[in-house]
Each structure stands twice: as C-alpha cells, then as structure tokens.
Amino acid sequence: MKKLLGRLILTSLVLSSHGASAQPQGQDRPLAFEVASVKLSRGGPVKVQSDPGRLTVNDESVEVLIKLAFGLRDYQFTGPGWLHTTRYDIVATTASPQPRSVQLAMLRSLLIERFKLATHHESKTLPIYALIAGKTGPKLKPMDENLPAPFELYSNFSMAPAPGGATELRGYGTLGQLSDFLTRLVERPVLDRTGIAGAFDIRLLCAVEGFPGFDTSPNAFDAVQSQLGLKLEAGVSSVEITVVDHVEKPTEN
C-alpha cells in the first residue's frame, strides 16, 4: 500500500473524449505535435508540465500517460503490467501556442502512432463510494490563485508528517483528485458527486497503511466528514473501463 500511495502522490484535464483519435473541426487528420522526442527515462524528478508551446514529460510511466491523455481514473483502466513500470521522457512541441486540452489531444495521437496503442471499452457495474457534501456543509479552502492550475489526473498531493507522529495528505487539487486518493484507502472507486467545482488547498489527516500514525489516526470515512465536511456514501454505479488491446514500446528518437 505504501508503494502504491507513493506513486499516487504523482498520479491524480478530465477529457470527455475516450476515442482512439482526436480530430479538430474541419480537418481530416488528427491533431499532432510538430516535433516529439520519446526516450526511455534515465531517472530524475517525475513530472508532467504543460506550457503554451511545449509538453514535457519526465520519468513517467506509459500507464499514467494513457490515463492523462484519455481522461481515465485508475479504476477505469486495465493493461499489461509493463505499462506501469516502463518510464519515458517526452519533449513535444507545437507549431503555435496551444492550450493544455489541445496538447492532450496531441498526446493521444502520439500514443496511437508511436506506441501503436489500441483499446476498447467495457461497461461494468461496481460497488462504489460517492463523495458528497456533509450535512453541515463543506469545509474547503480555495487553492492559491497564483499557483498553476493542476492537471485533473495528475495531482500535487504528497504524504507529510503531522504533529503527534501522524501522517496527513497535503497538496492542492480538485475533489476529483481527492476522490482518487480516497479510492486507494477504501479499496473501491470513489466518485466525486459533490457538484463542487474548483481546486482546493487540501489537508487530510487519516490512517494510511504503512505510514506513521496508522493505529492512532481516524479512518478515511471519519476524517473526510470531520475535517472536510464531506461524506462517503456507499452505492453501486456503472463504470466505463478502457482495456488496452495492443501497445508497443516505441523506437526512441
């Protein structure tokens, strides 16, 4: 669990399209980067950074890139194990400044063309928890407006020591990203059904297996309600799953 949560810290643009390619209006060919370098990672800080004319990926797994490009939560994806462990550095530039949403459409095209990615979709009914507002209302601190807008599926959360030998989640992001973190704690999908938009400065002290304070900290259900004014409500829901049918390791350039 500790290893998995360590990767979560860096894994939490929702895109409405999950198709195999993305095409701009009025054009017949998919959006694509002008130049894209793809190389096996040699280590370094893990990051995905979007600037107007460039998308930079450092030491990130193919699995995370697929989730980012196609707007998939962890529980919406299944593929071969090497996608989780094989990591790449990518520097991709655009002919003109482009917003993040267009760059991710280009990333979809890159995965299809360079990694030969092919997928299909399945719908499954799963037990879930819905994240909803509590009876007393949410207790949420808006994110500092001077900070860059977070990737919806690539969070800025980390685990940090808290007073009394405990551990807390710290960082900023949307309630969708918080739901991704909670999914790992409660071991079933958590769907954000609060209807609350925006990004928040989040602090959540709760029991996390493998981290200090596990035996003395509140469980996730109690912590979410008392500290954030939110609630986890059990239910079932139909969830679309993206299944990888084919993917290859690309030729480096």
Image: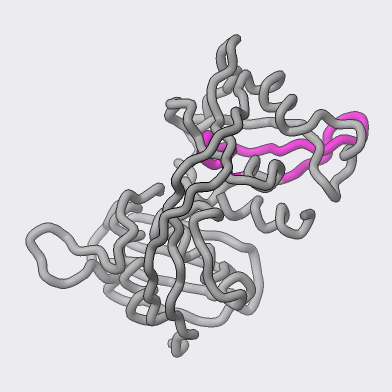
Residue drawn at the location 45% of the way across and 67% of the way down:
243
Q: Which quadrant of the view contains residue 253?
A: bottom left
Res. 229 in view: yes
User: Would residue 179 be counted in the magenta stretch?
Assistant: yes
Q: Residue most toward the bottom? A: 251
Please provide the residue range marked out in magenta: 159-180
Vertical arrangement, residue 164 with respect to residue 61, above or below: above
Would you say 154 lies left or right of 169 here? left
Tell me, yes or no, whether the highlighted magenta stretch contains residue 87.
no
Q: Residue at x 69, y 41 (%)?
A: 186
View extreme (left): residue: 26
Q: In which quarter of the image is residue 161?
A: top right
- Can you say which quadrant of the picture contains the N terminus? bottom right
For the residue pair 195 and 58, the one nearer the viewer reads as: 195
Taking depth in this image into account, of 50 and 235 the one nearest to the observer is: 235
Q: Residue at x 50, y 61 (%)?
A: 77
Does the rendering let one see residue 174? Answer: no
Residue 111 placed where, x, y %? 39, 73
Identify the residue shown where x is 56% and y is 30%.
131
Q: In this view, does 154 lie above or below 191?
A: below
In this rendering, the answer to whether 68 lies above or below 171 is below
The part of the image, by quadrant, that contains residue 45 is bottom right
Q: Position of residue 23 (x, y in %)?
A: 19, 63
Asked if residue 241 is positioned above or below residue 169 in the image, the reply reads below
Q: Is residue 195 left or right of residue 86?
A: left
